[in-house]
Image (cartoon, rainbow, N blue to C red):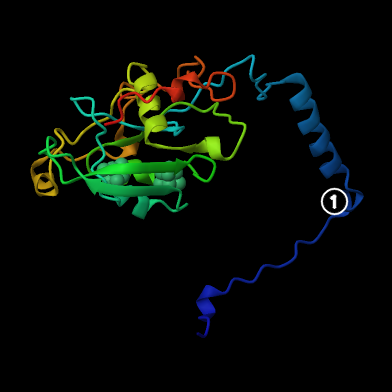
Amino acid sequence: MAVAKDDVMWIEEPEMGFWEMTFLPAILDGLKTTIRHVTHYDPVTQQYPEEKPSLPLHYRGVHRLNRDEKGRVKCVACMLCATACPADCISIEASAAPPDWPDRDKFPATFVLDELRCIYCGMCEEACPVDAIELTHIYDLTGETRESMRFDREKLLAVYDKTKDDPRDPLRTRRGKLGPAADFGTLPTVAPATQVTAGDRSAQSTAPGTIHTYNNPRPFDDPGGAT
Ligand code: SF4
Ligand code: SF4
């Protein structure tokens, strides 16, 4: 496509005067910047792990799978999170829900999220129609093997159990009760993450995370009544 003449802007090379040709003004400018940094030293480096970071609002850390009011996994295995995930790090195998779970057709027989592959974009949380998956404030996740970073349903439920009472990770459920897809039209609209207020998620706390696979793997060993 031809470029319109009006879209072209010609830039003339500026002519250098005597002082510019000596480079003294540029050198003085550089010295001024150096002196400003020396006299107004404002460190930005944090001495982690002695100092815990002050997390920004809406920090997106390790995931959790929420439970419903009966303690069951809230996920209905609709696959929307796996479909929305740009990193392709969620694998779910759906099964027919047990007969005594009349509020849904399916549940996740397996749910695996690869925390190493995840880019923590939050799309899974945005996509979930029943607020079953959420990202938490936990940032200091470590593991000794790649396999240990593939969080299965029980681990993700254990993260929920560990974080649900933490003021930094209140349940952000907006959808109301868990129900079949037909209910979605009548349920309250979910607020986008950008509209979550400070009161929803006080991520500015400087307290450390609570779950460590590195030196405290116990929380994830607890099956926690996944179903
Ligand atoms: S945060 Fe993003 S990359 Fe990670 S599991 Fe969710 S959708 Fe996938
Ligand atoms: S979007 Fe929500 S309900 Fe659907 S599979 Fe993912 S976590 Fe489960």
Q: Position of residue 124 (x, y in %)?
A: 36, 44
Which residue is outermost to the right? 22
> Which amino acid type is shown beneath numbered disc 1?
Glu
Name the residue: 31% across, 27% down: 197
Which residue is outermost to the front? 99
Name the residue: 58% across, 40% down: 146
Name the residue: 35% across, 29% down: 157
The residue that mark 1 highlights is 20
Query: For this view, does 78 lie left or right of residue 220?
Result: left
Can residue 114 be seen in this snapshot? yes
Which residue is outermost to the bottom? 2
Q: Position of residue 208 (x, y in %)?
A: 52, 17
Say which quarter of the image contains residue 186.
top left
Quarter of the displayed picture in which ligand 1 can be seen: top left
The residue carrying pointer 1 sits among few (fewer than 14), some (14 to 19) or many (20 or more) residues within 10 Å by Cα, namely few
Q: Where is residue 62 in the image (x, y as percent from the top left)?
A: 45, 32
